C-alpha cells in the first residue's frame, strides 16, 4: 500500500497519526511493516517521531523499529537507534545511543 495514513482515536478524537511512503500488511497474522519517511504525530503530547521503518507486532501489541529514531517534544529533541512503543503511543522507548538536546 502506498502513502498509508493511520489514525488513532481517543474519545472520538484523532489522538495520533502514523504515515509512511509504503506499508506491507500480512493478513494472516495482522502484522504490518511501514517503510520510507515514517512519521508519528502524537497530538495529545505535541510529539513527533521520525523513522526509516516501523513494524507492528500484533502478538506483543507493540510497535518496533531497528532504525534511527528522532523524537521531537516541546522540551527536547531525542535521537537514537531502535524503538519499542505500546499501541497507544503512551510508552515510547528509544533503545540505543540515546542523545537528548534541550530546546
Image (cartoon, rainbow, N blue to C red):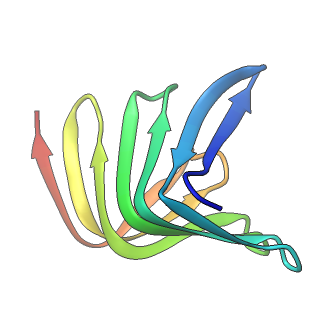
- How far across and down, in percent of the image, does residue 57 sit? 69, 73
Residue drawn at the location 10% of the way across and 47% of the way down: 101
> Nearest the camera: 41 or 19?
19
- How far across and down, in percent of the image, does residue 67 sit? 35, 74
- How far across and down, in percent of the image, does residue 80 sit? 25, 67
Q: As displayed, is residue 86 above or below residue 61?
A: above
Q: Which quarter of the rendered picture does the N terminus lie within?
A: bottom right
Task: Please indicate, yes or no, whether residue 98 appears anywhere in the rendered image.
Answer: yes
The extreme right residue here reads: 28
The extreme front residue here reads: 2
Task: Please indicate, yes or no, whether residue 56 appears anywhere in the rendered image.
Answer: no
Residue drawn at the location 89% of the way across and 79% of the way down: 28
Residue drawn at the location 55% of the way across and 46% of the way down: 18
Q: Is residue 97 left or right of residue 85?
A: left
Residue drawn at the location 73% of the way across and 64% of the way down: 61
Q: Is residue 96 left or right of residue 47?
A: left
> How many dots with numbers?
0
Q: Which quarter of the rendered picture does the C terminus lie within?
A: top left
Image quadrant where residue 37 sits: bottom left
> Nearest the camera: 53 or 76?
53
Image quadrant where residue 9 sits: top right
- How far across and down, in percent of the image, does residue 27 sit? 85, 73
Amino acid at each position: 500500500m502506498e502513502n498509508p495514513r493511520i489514525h488513532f482515536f481517543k474519545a472520538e478524537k484523532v489522538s495520533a497519526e502514523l504515515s509512511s511512503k509504503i506499508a506491507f500488511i500480512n493478513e494472516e497474522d495482522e502484522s504490518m511493516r511501514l517503510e520510507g519517511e515514517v512519521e508519528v504525530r502524537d497530538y495529545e503530547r505535541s510529539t513527533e517521531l521520525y523513522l526509516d521503518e516501523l513494524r507492528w507486532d500484533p502478538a506483543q501489541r507493540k510497535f518496533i523499529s531497528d532504525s534511527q529514531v528522532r523524537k521531537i517534544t516541546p522540551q527536547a529533541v531525542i535521537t537514537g537507534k531502535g524503538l519499542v512503543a505500546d499501541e497507544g503511543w503512551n510508552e515510547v522507548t528509544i533503545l540505543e545511543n540515546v542523545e537528548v538536546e534541550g530546546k
